[in-house]
Amino acid sequence: MAILPIITVPDKRLRKISEPVSQVTDELRQLAEDMLDTMYDAPGVGLAAIQVGHPVRLLVIDAANKEDMPPNPMVIFNPEIIAASEETNFYEEGCLSVPEYFADVERPLTCTVRYLSKDNEQKELECTDFLATVIQHEMDHLEGKMFIDYLSKLKRDRVVKKLTKQAREKATAS
Ligand code: NI
């Protein structure tokens, strides 16, 4: 078990576009395991590899967020949205790279995602409601995009400024 450090705003690596995986290797499977440990420890419901500093198209998700639901860890490489509903909904989103900040984001209510499994199999996943929100949020990270990008410039500038100040204070203190 390994808990990896999660990078936060304003770290520029979060704006990088992640590279597709040509084949899932043991090394990448280990990274996925470590990312799951890191996500559960945080705790969070999703994590993209770039959030732990690896610019590869890999996500881990567990959208079984209710206490009475059994854990459902998912490891997803090279995800692609092949269909999305016109109907949208709002969820209050947060992000492990944007600590202690939450805001409503509007996204398609359902989507179908094609991806490569950790056993190198092409699979498709139907996502609705919370899972659809989580997977779309995590997929944005692969494009260097974050949920705060959906907010007004005023709101976004405010949270980036606050986190930049915190990062500076932390650097000075240590
Ligand atoms: Ni995020």
Image (cartoon, rainbow, N blue to C red):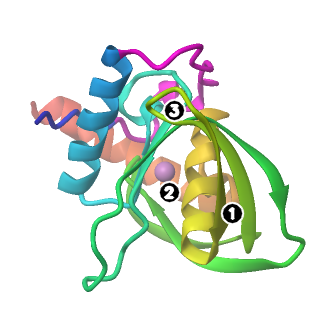
The residue under the point 56% across, 28% down is 57
Among all residues in the image, which is located at the extreme right?
86
Q: Circle 2 sits on which residue?
A: 159
Q: Is mark 1 within 8 Å of ligand 1?
A: no
Residue 107 picture quarter: bottom right
Q: Is residue 64 left or right of residue 173?
A: right
* Whether residue 138 is situated above or below residue 152 in the rendered picture: above
Whether 35 is among the magenta residues is no
Q: Circle 3 sits on which residue?
A: 14
Locate residue 69, reporting x and y percent: 31, 79
Q: Is mark 2 within 8 Å of ligand 1?
A: no
First in residue order: circle 1 vs circle 3:
3
For the record, the magenta segment spans: 7-25
Q: Is residue 116 left or right of residue 2?
A: right
Q: Circle 1 sits on which residue?
A: 151
Q: CA distance from mark 1 to mark 2?
A: 10 Å
Q: CA distance from mark 2 to mark 3?
A: 15 Å
